């Protein structure tokens, strides 16, 4: 059983996704411009004396470690809903703030954990909210999330929208 705080944090993400407008094509173009501006700033900050790409990007400390340590941390937190929700929330902040795509691994783990915890309705709600925004992303993990949402009855692949 996951702590109540983890479920509350996930519910807040679901509400955030449900209340955030879906990007239109012009919004996506603006997001692309935000991303370019952000990445230009990261590049300039990283070449300053004492600057590094890790410091300049403001990303999670998770990514600023040796590969073996990274893998060990990922493995040790794989079934921790609170950690997965926190990491995904950070990714959402970066997406909506700077246009930087979040790794799909964290929402994937959230869905898996919810399934193992038999949180059927919460998993369906999460997948619906997630796929409303990101259901058409390409990539193997993204496509696995969309397929899971379809299987769980949370997403309509023809209309690219949640099932009501």
Image (tube, rainbow, N blue to C red):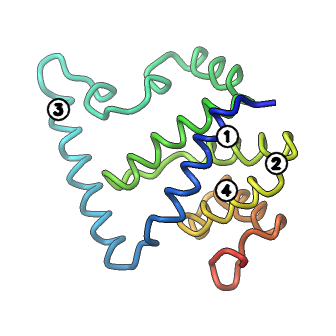
Residue tagged 1: 7
Pointer 2 and pointer 1: residues touching (CB < 8 Å)?
Answer: yes
Q: Residue at x 62, y 65 (%)?
A: 131
Q: Residue at x 78, y 44 (%)?
A: 114
Residue tagged 4: 126
Element at label 4: helix
Residue tagged 2: 119
Element at label 2: loop
> Which circle's residue, 2 or 4, is located before the other in the chain?
2
C-alpha gap between disc 2 and disc 3: 43 Å
> Which circle's residue, 2 or 1, is located before the other in the chain?
1
Left or right, 100 with respect to 119, comes to: left
Residue 42 picture location, percent across and down: 23, 38
C-alpha gap between disc 4 and disc 1: 11 Å
> Which circle's residue, 3 or 1, is located before the other in the chain?
1
Residue 13 picture location, percent across and down: 55, 50
């Amino acid at each position: 059983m996951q702590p109540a705080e983890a479920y509350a944090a996930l519910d807040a993400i679901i509400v955030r996704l449900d209340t955030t407008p879906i990007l239109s094509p012009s919004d996506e173009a603006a997001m692309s411009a935000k991303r370019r501006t952000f990445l230009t700033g990261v590049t300039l900050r990283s070449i300053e004396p004492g600057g590094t790409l890790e410091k300049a990007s403001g990303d999670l400390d998770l990514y600023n470690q040796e590969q073996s340590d990274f893998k060990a941390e990922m493995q040790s937190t794989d079934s921790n809903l609170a950690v997965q929700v926190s990491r995904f929330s950070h990714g959402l902040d970066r997406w909506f703030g700077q246009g930087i795509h979040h790794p799909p691994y964290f929402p994937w783990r959230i869905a898996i954990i919810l399934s193992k915890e038999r949180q059927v309705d919460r998993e369906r709600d999460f997948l619906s909210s997630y796929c409303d925004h990101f259901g058409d992303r390409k990539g193997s993990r993204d496509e696995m999330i969309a397929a899971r949402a379809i299987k769980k009855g949370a997403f309509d692949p023809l209309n690219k929208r949640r099932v009501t």
